[in-house]
Image: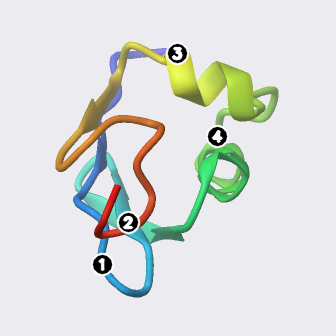
Amino acid sequence: MSERSVIVYPPTAQGRQVWVDGVLVGEACGLHVLAELLQRAGWESLDEIDVADLPIIEWHGGGPEVWSQRG
C-alpha cells in the first residue's frame, strides 16, 4: 500500500474530524470509532490499539488519549 495521509483534528463538541488522503471520512469520539472510520477507508484489520500506535496518523490538538475539548 502506498503512503497515505491521516489527520485527526482537535476535539470539538461533536468529536474529532478525521481526514484520510485529503477527504473528510467522519468524526470520531474515541479510538473505537476512529478504527471503524479507518477500516472503511481501507485499513480493514485495524483495532483501537493499532490506531493509537499508527505512526501515519497526524494528531492535532492532542494525541490518541484526547477526545474532549477538556482533554
Q: Residue at label 4?
A: 42
Q: Is residue 25 left or right of residue 37?
A: left
Task: Select label 3 or label 4 by which is in front.
Answer: 3
| Secondary-structure class at tag 2 | strand
Percent coordinates x, y for residue 45 in the rendering: 81, 27
Residue positioned 30% across, 65% down in the render: 70
User: Pointer 3: residues within 10 angstroms few (<14), some, or many (20+)?
Assistant: few
Whichever of callouts 3 and 4 sits on the residue coming sooner in the sequence is 4
**Which circle marks residue 16 in the picture?**
2
10 Å neighbourhood of mark 1: few (<14), some, or many (≥20)?
some
Mark 3 sits on what residue? 53
- Amino acid type at mark 2: Arg
Residue type for callout 1: Thr
Q: CA distance from mark 3 to mark 1?
A: 22 Å
Q: Nearer the viewer, residue 45 or 14?
A: 14
Provide the residue designation for mark 1.
12
Q: Is residue 49 above or below residue 21?
A: above
Residues at discs 2 and 1 in contact (Cβ within 8 Å)? yes
The first of marks 4 and 2 along the sequence is 2
Eye-nearest disc, 4 or 2? 2
Q: Residue furthest left?
A: 61
Q: Where in the figure is residue 18, as x and y percent of width and height? A: 39, 59
N-terminal of the pair, mark 3 or mark 2, is 2
